[in-house]
Amino acid sequence: MDGIINIAAVLPRMAQQQPDVAAIHYPTGRGVDGRRVYHSWSYRQLDEASSRIARGLEKVGIGRGVRTVLMVPPSLEFFALTFGMFKAGVVPVVVDPGIGIKNLGVCLAEAQPQAFVGITKAHVARILFGWGKATLEKFVTVGRRLLWRGHTLEEVKRLAGDDPQWSMASTSAEDVAAILFTSGSTGVPKGVVYTHGNFVTQVDAIKEMYDIRPGEVDLPTFPMFGLFDPAMGMTTVIPDMDFTRPAAVDPAMIEEAVRRFGVTTMFGSPALLDTVGRYGEAHGSRLPGLKRVISAGAPVPASVMRKMVAMLDDDAQVVTPYGATESLPVATISSRVVLVETGAKTDAGAGTCVGHPVRQTEVCIIRIDDAPLATFSPDLTLPCGEIGEICVKGPVVTRSYFNRDQSTALAKLQDPAGGFWHRMGDLGYLDEQGRIWFCGRKSHRVITANGTLYTEPVEGVFNVHPQVKRTALAGVPAGPAQQRPVLCVELEPDCPSTSHQAVLAALREIAGKHAHTRAIDSFLIHPGFPVDIRHNAKIDRTALGHWAQGKL
């Protein structure tokens, strides 16, 4: 094992250190008393199951370097398969099924997978829609195999046999570990190439940032985040929820799981936290024992943080790592800082502070440019306080997209001093304390005759209205290379229709009080913003722009 850098290498170590500690609790239904029933695996069981799968996959020709689509919902098998693939050096290809049939087909064609591991329904869809038919050669079915070729997972495990001499693939930091597709919330999903070094550094950074220790218990409401847990020695409680609709989570389930298993960490999107926080405020519910609530996917409003903090113990907090599929984590900030200082500045139009860069990660702001920039130069950088594109460099930063040379060229900058920079596609600035302030996506900026508007600084000043749930700046074509700014408004559910015009009048008054919003004269109430499937939090401002154009 010495010298091997493999994200799965920590699992056997944890199985030795805490063999009988629960690694995973998985909900399987309800008992006669109405309580949820969970099936559990210890660290020893997870390690043994994943090693057996690794050996079996190798026996059926799915071994080191084989790109393998993984379409299995969160379950015991999902964890065992993922770690089994890593142990065998297989390269999992993970695509969010919520991106739609057409995008799924495009993503899988680009990934050129050689094997497909999925539940029965995933195989049926693969055949119906022709996913990966040009390159797929090996098939494993989790569940019942119908008329297609290949093996079932049970057959794979039987073929594994017992081999005391077997050891995991001797991968290095530079070896490809997985291809993870972005959510596609601001464009076509792209396959991000992760190395084992990326994963290991990512786990170490998260562990260090939030002081996570073996023996803690996690409730990850985004399944991919749960894959970090075994590598950190945490127990994973898989929540009983629809992972494609986090905003529709049952808050009572969250409360029950936290109390029952002594959960110390919970990961949730801002939309999920909003749902849970509103429930807590209405019912006086609390989440005792939680040390930290981690949220990512979109900026977390101070109002949502405030509701969540009210449900936690006095020494607990909400923390928000900033980053993207291509680079995570980049920075982090806590609810203590937001609620005491930066939240008020966000309300005044300063954008959203996402905190200081994490250790080993360099951050700079470069001038806004939609074209590729081949080489990094200090001449590209902007001074403190000036808005530009956020660029990052460090060991958590991925190097490329798979089979997307043009996208890679747009996102990566070679540094003559060594290494490379990743262009986040996000706009922002650095303050005098070295903190990053997020001002919105580059593709969402609105270029008007009076200057450029950025989503976060604009929306922040309007979101303070008590009857506004959230707002979104959108651009409508208004001549060559120019747009007309439109503020789309989603109201609180309890805002009566008789108050709509009064709310719009108040928003117009707010617009007049700020230099950067004075030119906005179009305000439209929208029944419910379109959001991404993964987190239910990223607003599809492009779709809103088309909607606003039709309305105007």
Image (cartoon, grey):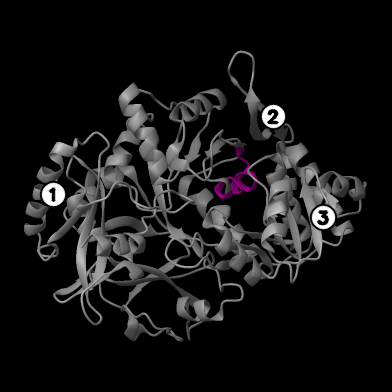
Which residue is the site of mark 2? 39
Q: Residues within 10 Å of mark 2 (few under 14, many from 20)?
A: few
Dot 3, how many residues are within 10 Å of its Cα: few (below 14), some (14-19), or many (20+)?
Answer: few
**Kind of residue at disc 1:** Leu
**Residue 271 spot, x, y in % from top left:** 39, 44
Residue 431 drawn above or below residue 389: above
Quarter location, residue 515 = bottom left
The answer to whether residue 159 shows anywhere in this view is: yes
- Which residue does the image show at 81% across and 65% down from the upper left? 137
Q: Which is nearer the N-term, disc 1 or disc 3?
A: 3
Q: Are marks 1 and 3 in contact (CB under 8 Å)?
A: no
Q: Residue at x 7, y 52 (%)?
A: 509
Residue type, numbered disc 2: His
Q: Earlier in the sequence, mark 1 or mark 2?
A: 2
Q: What number of labels is visible?
A: 3
**Any part of residue 194 in sight:** no
Spot the residue most to the top: 33
Q: Magenta residues, as a range?
A: 224-235
Q: Name the residue beneath numbered marker 3.
A: 148
Q: In the rendered image, which quarter contains the C terminus?
A: bottom left
Give the structural element (helix, strand or loop) at label 3: loop
Task: Identify residue for label 1.
Answer: 504
Could you tell me what secondary structure mostly forms the magenta stretch? helix
Q: In this rendering, would 392 be left or right of 232?
A: left
Q: Is residue 229 part of the magenta span, yes or no?
A: yes
Q: Nearer the viewer, mark 1 or mark 2?
A: 1
- Residue sitting nearer the eye, 281 or 490: 490
The residues tagged by marks 1 and 2 sit, at their Cα atoms, a distance apart of 52 Å
The answer to which of marks 3 and 2 sits earlier in the sequence is: 2
Image position, residue 483 (x, y; %)? 22, 73
